[in-house]
Image: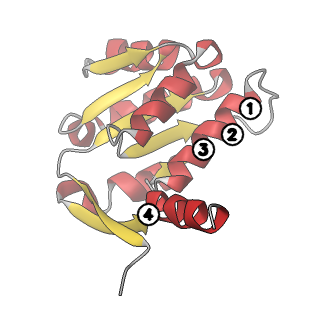
Amino acid sequence: METDYMDVTIEKKKKIALIAHDGKKTELLDWASRNKEILQNHFLCGTGTTGSLIQEKTGLPVQIFKSGPLGGDQQIGARIVDGKIDMLIFIWDPMEAQPHDPDIKALLRIATVYDIPIANNLATADFIIHSRFMNEEYIHPIEDYNKQMKKRMEILLK
């Protein structure tokens, strides 16, 4: 019987995207500093200012993308689609309106579609990086949307 799921492997060395809204950057910087020993074992990337600040404050290497409002959120989303990001730590400010809110929602949606761990606050980020899965390969099933699209096309072409 065909399955509508496929196994995806998150390697032992995780590819982690770090993002924070302006009002939350200090919190994420402090968190990254406290968790430097764990983070140094993984590949880090981040949007504009956030990634630059983390790199400067912690000394950890961070691949820097554009600022969120300038397309950085979309760059990270594209890498999630390509399997080049395994985890999203996005500390957002629920009390401030963001001019690029549609980009943020698109990023969170794509992270959900590809079933990667997402932390929107520091408590969740702590639970994720202190999980036993941070130090081992993790295999999990995700919906095979390509197979679903093929089925839809077959129905439409009948």
Q: Is residue 61 above or below residue 137?
A: above
Within-10-Å neighbours for mark 3: few <14, some 14–19, many 20+:
some
Q: N-terminal of the two: label 3 or label 1?
A: 1
| Amino acid of disc 1 | Pro
Mark 4 and mark 2: span between their CA atoms?
A: 22 Å
| Amino acid of disc 3 | Leu
| Amino acid of disc 2 | Lys
Q: Are marks 1 and 2 in contact (CB under 8 Å)?
A: yes
Indicate left or right for 100 with 66 as reference: right
Instruction: Kindly state the secondary structure of the residue where label 3 is placed.
Output: helix
Image coordinates of residue 110 in percent, x first then y, are 55, 45
Mark 3 and mark 4: span between their CA atoms?
A: 19 Å
Q: Residue at x 35, y 46 (%)?
A: 86
Residue that badge 3 annotates: 108
Indicate left or right for 143 with 26 as reference: left
Mark 1 and mark 2: span between their CA atoms?
A: 5 Å
| Amino acid of disc 4 | Asp
Residue that badge 4 annotates: 144
Instruction: Kindly state the secondary structure of the residue where label 1 is placed.
Output: helix
Identify the disc placed on residue 102: 1
Residue that badge 2 annotates: 105
State whether residue 39 appears in this view: yes
Q: N-terminal of the two: label 4 or label 2?
A: 2
Indicate left or right for 150 with 86 as reference: right
State whether residue 132 appears in this view: no
- Quadrant position of the C terminus in the picture: bottom right
